[in-house]
Amino acid sequence: MDKASYNSFAIAQFQFDRTADWLNLDLPTRELLRVPLKEHQFLIPLRLDDGKVKIFRGFRVVHNDARGPAKGGVRFHPQETIDTIRALAMWMTWKCALMDIPLGGSSGGIACDPHDLTLREQEQLCRGWVRQLGGGLGPRVDVPAPDIMTSAQHMLWMLDEYETMRGEKSPGFITGKPVGLGGSLGRMEATGYGLIFALREALKELGIQPGGTTASVQGFGNVGQHAVRLFQQIGGKVTCVSCWDQKEATSYAYQKDSGIDTQALAGITDRFGGIDKEKALKMGYEVLPGEAWLAQDVDILIPAAVENQITDENVKTIRPRVKIIAEGANGPTTLEADRTIAQRGILVIPDILANGGGVTCSYFEQVQSNMNYYWEKDEVLGKLDLKMTSAFSAVLELAKKKKLSLRDAAFSIAVARVVQACRDRGWV
Amino acid sequence: MPDKQSLAQFDRHFLTAKDKLTAIGRGSLGGKAHGLALMRDALERKLAPSFRPAINITIPTLTVITTEFFDLFMKQNDLYGLALSGLRDDLIAGAFQKAELPAQLVGDLRALVLQVHSPLAVRSSSLLEDAMFEPFASVYATKMIPNNQADADIRFRKLMEAIKFVYASTFFKEAKNYILATKNKTADEKMAVIIQEVVGLRHGQRFYPHLSGVARSFNFYPLGHAKPVDGVIDLALGLGKTIVDDGIAWSYSPAYPQANPPYNTLEDLLDQTQNEFWAINMGSPPEFDPIKETEYMAKFRLAEAEEDGVLRFMASTYRSQDDKIVYGISEKGPRVVDFAPILKFDLIPFNKLLKELLKLCQDMLEKMVEVEFAVTLDGDQGISARFGFLQVRPMVVSEEKVDLSLAELAGENVLLGSESALGNGILHSIQDIVFVKPDRFNVHHSEEIASQLERVNHRLVTAGRAYLLIGFGRWGTSDPQAGIPVNFGQISGAKVIVESALPETSSMLSQGSHFFHNITSFRVFYFSVGQGDKYKIDWDWLHRQDVVQETEFIREARLRSPLKIKVDGRTSRGVIIHD
């Protein structure tokens, strides 16, 4: 599948079908879970700062909420499609179930490029998105969170609009808020750290000490940076990171055999994870084409950028030394590439497990917000570690017992839990 | 020196794990944990089998957070500047509480508290202690937590607080002064933390071992027929804090377990023996104070131990009508914690165990040793026991031969002589004398005196000048009425300490008991000059010496030529001679 024809939802459905076969699900259950429960598509008219009016397309999809209120990100992306949102919502359902948190799955967004919008325009878009969805959102209904190109600031605008509409404070409406305004300590680190907690368990399973292992990471945004930081702390070395260069509209990989200096590199990185190429060159990094991150002679690959990055075309460039791929991004590996990787005996920690730390901490934030009582960071990260470790153990146990890949085992556990909730509610 | 030991990695099972001694991380275990790791196999192979089933000897389950996490904690929270700045202890402890533990550590700790609902001891295990293979007794904090709250979040939080408190104690003033006295730098110190199951039983709101003890293989105060190499045992009811910090214990020689410690009258014996004990407070939460070492500890009266049914294994009774001590507690009357049922009636082969244990530890460490332990007695008859081996550390014992005749004590130019001096050897280097002014001393000012001494000590230690310290009453007592309530860190630069009897009182001198570990490890000479002693301090000479500095209560004199200080450890005689 090439990048142009890549359809996330088709992949998500394929994954579900395979799992449904394996679980031997009946037809009504398949029909219920193969497509979203609810979909909203709407238009948001926005008066730009220059006085012109522009119409934006907004989305919100709830895939399933049998296990609890739906939870999912809000993306700002120029190429946003309903199919991507559907796939993300479905993956979120499975992810919440796999992490065993009492939430369903949703996703949403606006087809826009925030780089081209002023802050006021972005604020109006956020408020418009909340107004359009109205009662379809809420702490007991569907809880948004940041995703690609949305931040804590966007979440606060959305929260403010919601609270204005409701006439009451409701910090549990949304997650990803800044600390001090209803946010949770540890939220920034959660996805990246969660990924490393899962990676640590995978290394234990393979009998490899983290000290001395090397990794290459795609993406140097929030997830990538925190994953790199914790990986280094447990003794690993990251020799390459790649990221999108907004100015040149291409990606680059920054390589250093002695290991990257995370703090220094973060200092020359913009808020979207883009590293300043010129400064990196001066700091002694070798600058390579973006795809070079995949072809590094390392033990671990961490795709932590966007979907559809390891494909049938580039999977051959993965070096024989690679033992683990930990999917920090959602859907970074195509089905074809996944098959090749499995044949080569590389252990893949699938996205719904590897990046489950993000939604787990979002759940923690929501719990804290609903109580209006906030935990210390140690407490948040301690709970996160246990959730990640216990999810990894459950997946590994099933994979070993039934001779499945970790991805298939993870999907089986997640889908089975959602099916059980639907059955318990009498839906199927 | 014994080899470095390693422990299995903690696998998120604490009480149910195959390995009872584990480590989190791959850094250093620190001195305390290293000692336990060293003794683990020897205890199991060479000692434990011969005492089963009467006594079950174990090292209580523990996991060690190795020093790599201390490094990370300090670095990630950027704490070194603050920690080394000379800030007050409580401000340092407060700042450490606000800092975050490393992310890769907290999951293991959370897993631990989810499984354990009984008290935990969070103990320091320092790197310098390990590197020097020398004891740093009571220098760093130990925190006991009840860990019995129903909510795992609270248990987790309390464990975090305790670990941060132990980390912070690395930089407390007493510890800094102590390190300075060892010629090391606080910045080089690293702390491992031991999280250990507490040996004890719950009695209502209290959790404590039936007895705690410290056993030493060398005795600086051999009495009667006992020899120094017979060693000495200190026992107390409840947690060991009574012995280590309060200095109250039932002391006996393992060669003569049935002999009582010396006393003038039975009334004296009643006064000197334990009448309170420390336990972990399992009841309603005390005032929140995470930077207080005894936050969850409390002192209870003997009557409460009797209500708990514990005292019958530990005590005798004073019968006033015929001024006698009768064994056991079947009669009414004041109780004497003398451990008679165990020591005099051999309820369990306890003394035999201690003798063999001391020998084993001495063989393993190739040095004289000091061992801490805690014991619970099971069953209504108290006939089987759990012996928790808590700590082993080396003792420093000087072997220099010093001949000191009685004539020398009464000779010319003697500043003071004593027939109860501690230590062994000769010193020629001391020119500084710090003394409490006899005309100004008053027990009502003893706390003020302690803080003035701390400032003098800090200045002299920083200048690298060891000194002779002379004061009144029990050095290091927790009771300001009984002497000067300093901790050893406040007088850490003193190479020779003299305690003189309080004017117009007959209270016993401490004879170094409060600082016993420090005195032995730093080879400090300790002189006691009692009220009725033959040899006195030559105050007139002292008052004529050049004064360097003076405060309301303290005078600091500097001599033109050094004093000659001799102590004969075999006879306990000591003398200080001036030019």
Image (tube, rainbow, N blue to C red):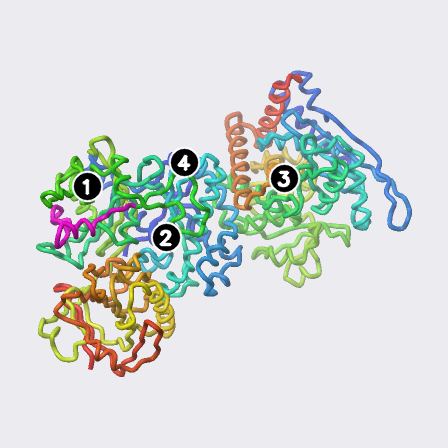
User: Which quadrant is home to the N terminus of chain A?
Assistant: top right
Residue A241, compared with residue B17, is above or below; it is below
Please tell me the numbered disc located at residue B117: 4
Residue pointed to by mark 1: B315
Spatial distance from mark 2 to mark 3, Cα to Cα? 39 Å
> In this view, which residue lies farthest toward the front?
B321
Q: Is residue A205 left or right of residue B132?
A: right
Ranked by sequence position, the earlier of labels 2 and 1 is 2
**Pointers 3 and 4 in contact (CB under 8 A)?**
no
Q: Is residue B485 left or right of residue A69?
A: left
Q: Are marks 2 and 1 on the same chain?
A: yes
Q: Which residues are magenta?
A: B252-277
The answer to whether residue A64 shows anywhere in this view is yes
User: Which quadrant is home to the C terminus of chain A?
Assistant: top right
- State the residue at coordinates (16%, 50%): B267
Residue pointed to by mark 3: A369
Residue pointed to by mark 2: B125
How crowded pointer 2 is (Cα within 10 Å; few <14, some 14-19, many 20+) is rated as many
Spatial distance from mark 2 to mark 1, Cα to Cα? 34 Å
Ranked by sequence position, the earlier of labels 2 and 4 is 4
Residue nearest the observer in this picture, B34 or B517: B517
